[in-house]
Image (cartoon, grey):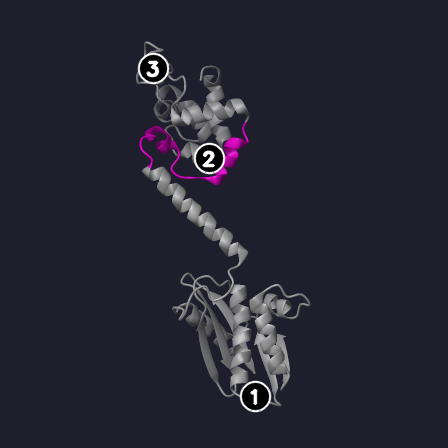
Amino acid sequence: MWYTDGSRIEQGAGAGIYGVRPETKIPLSLGRFATVFQAEVAAIQGCAREIIGQGAARQSIAIYSDSQAALKAIGSMQVCSRLVWDCVKALQELGSRNKLTLAWVPGHKGHKGNEEADSLAREGAGRALIGPEPFCGIAKTHVRASIDEWMDDKSREWWRNLPQQRQAKMFIKERSARLTDDLLGQNRKAIRIIVGLLTEHCRLNKHMSLMGLAEEATCRFCSEEEETAVHVLCQCEGLARLRFLILGEENPSASSYTKAPLSRLWSLIQRTQLDRVL
């Protein structure tokens, strides 16, 4: 009897092969890009190749796996993966000389062979792959995830290194797909006002005075400080109670506005009637 398992940890993926008699323990490293499914299939293929290499003939051989997805893919009439096809060919070669049984075993249920294979798979996942990467074809899901991660890293780096934009960076710390979708879900008027307020390119008194279009830069709500977006949204004592009613905080941080639904910011804008001014 033979048991196989696949594993994936932060360092990478691995496959484990355990033979009962004679006792055989094989941990395999599959590198950083293989998925758990690919590791499960690679473990079954590696097991078949190991048995063939031992010269097995005219024997009753059983290979157990706890991956129903891998077993279903191997038994499918349509194969779309090179790794699965190579596994099928290895099993066919082994089965042509022996009575071969490929079966499912419940994972993590105390089966000694399965637990041994699981331990070997985790050991393999922690090792470095010997040879070029990737070990096998990269899954589309992994490609998309890697591209998204790369885009996030690059956008954060670009935003961090972008000169000026001090005001906008206080409210928007990094690229956010949720924030983008939330903003684009507003009407055109709301989008114009929200973007203008977050970047302070709007008709607040401080900005208008800098452009020579207003005599006073003083806040219209408290008449104490200069009327900037940060002051109005985070600091103005005249709006403290209103901010508490809408946001649950009297003095929220600038970034809290973009972390919360923009409907709250828009509600504050409307309640202060700034939508008639900005």
Q: On the image, numbered disc 2 is attached to which residue?
A: 260
Q: Could you give the CA–CA distance between mark 3 and mark 1, rounded to whole angstroms?
A: 87 Å
Marks 2, 3: nearer the viewer: 3
Tell whether position 171 is magenta. yes
Is the residue marked by circle 1 packed among few (<14), some (14-19), or many (20+) residues within 10 Å? some
Amino acid, disc 1: Ala
Q: Could you give the CA–CA distance between mark 2 and mark 1, rounded to whole angstroms?
A: 64 Å
Q: Position of residue 74 (x, y in %)?
A: 62, 70
Please, what secondary structure does the residue beneath circle 3 have?
Answer: loop
| Residue 253 visible in the displayed image | no
Q: On the image, numbered disc 1 is attached to which residue?
A: 56
Q: On the image, numbered disc 3 is attached to which residue?
A: 211
Q: The C terminus appears in which quarter of the rendering? A: top left
Earlier sequence position, callout 2 versus callout 3: 3
Is the residue marked by circle 2 packed among few (<14), some (14-19), or many (20+) residues within 10 Å? few
Q: Position of residue 149 (x, y in %)?
A: 44, 49
Q: Residue at x 59, y 89 (%)?
A: 57
Q: Which residues are magenta?
A: 162-186
Q: Residue at x 46, y 27 (%)?
A: 265
Amino acid, disc 3: Met
Q: Could you give the CA–CA distance between mark 2 and mark 3, rounded to whole angstroms?
A: 32 Å
Tell whether position 32 is magenta. no
